[in-house]
Amino acid sequence: MNGVFAPSPGRAPMRTILTRQARLEILLTLRRGEAVVLNLVVPLLALIGAGLTDVIRLPGDDRLGFVVPGVIGLAVMSTAFTGLAISTGYERSYGVLKRLGASPLTRWGLLTAKIAAVLTVLVVEVVILAGVGLALGWRPSVAGVLPALGVVTAATCAFAGFGFLLAGVLRAEATVGAATLIYLVMLTAGGVMFPLPGLGGVERLLPLAALTEGMRAALSDGSVVPQWCWYCLGAWAVIGIFAAARCFRWE
């Protein structure tokens, strides 16, 4: 009977840890139905209001070609930055993350799992927003779909990194205030519903501006995404993710 019981204590492989944590994060995100709906309803209302009316003066004749990429960018920022920052901030405040910190899950692992959850939700949101846009008459360039998805993915990593960073260094209440303020600034100056304000090139430093302009370039006529969009989003993603992984505190 020797060898029947062979305990082998130790942590599971990191791949298994990340997979299970990502699955848990996706389930928890989908259970917060009110947040998902809010992150989707606001862009939908903006799409219908600005796309079908002349209340807002937009450049060019293709209103939906300008509005649809903008509201998709708004949904990405709402979900990947504001929503992630607030939910993670309260998880940290309630002591949930403190218990995770005692597990083999690393800060990198938690951030990776949360980005996976955000991307999963964004797939649903983007499909709905694009579907409504198509129903209203939006006709994007098929050749620009893949570059546009690349821009969305890079922007998601950038927003998620900084949302995770805010939640990891500030108290929950301060995280809510900071995330909301940044959201409003980005909404105003990021070229979502209005043309970029023309601040001498400073507006090109905003990740939301790079996201919306990159998608418009790719989806309007299939043209190449401007290089400055890739540089901007890549820099924000690298800085945000590394800063979050380094400075995040479990409690």
Image (tube, helix red, strand yellow):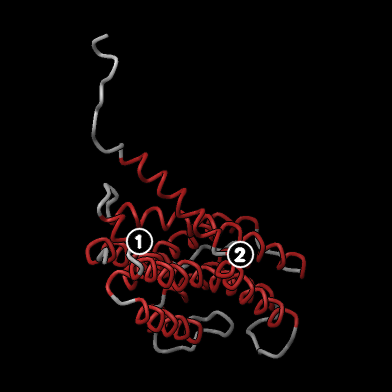
Kind of element beneath mark 1: helix
Rounded to the nearest angstrom, the CA distance separating label 1 from label 2 is 41 Å
To which quarter of the image does residue 247 belong?
A: bottom left
Residue 229: x and y in percent read 43, 69
Pointer 1 or 2: first along the chain? 1
Rendered image: mark on residue 96 = 1
Q: Identify the residue at the far top of this view.
A: 1
**Does any portion of residue 216 appear in the rendered image?**
no
Q: Residue most toward the front?
A: 1
Q: Amino acid at mark 2?
A: Leu
Q: Residue at x 45, y 51 (%)?
A: 24
**In front: mark 1 or mark 2?**
1
Residue type, label 1: Val
The numbered dot on residue 219 is 2
Residue occupying image coordinates x 63% and y 84%: 59
**Residue drawn where x is 41% and y is 57% of the image:** 114
Q: Residue at x 70, y 62 (%)?
A: 131
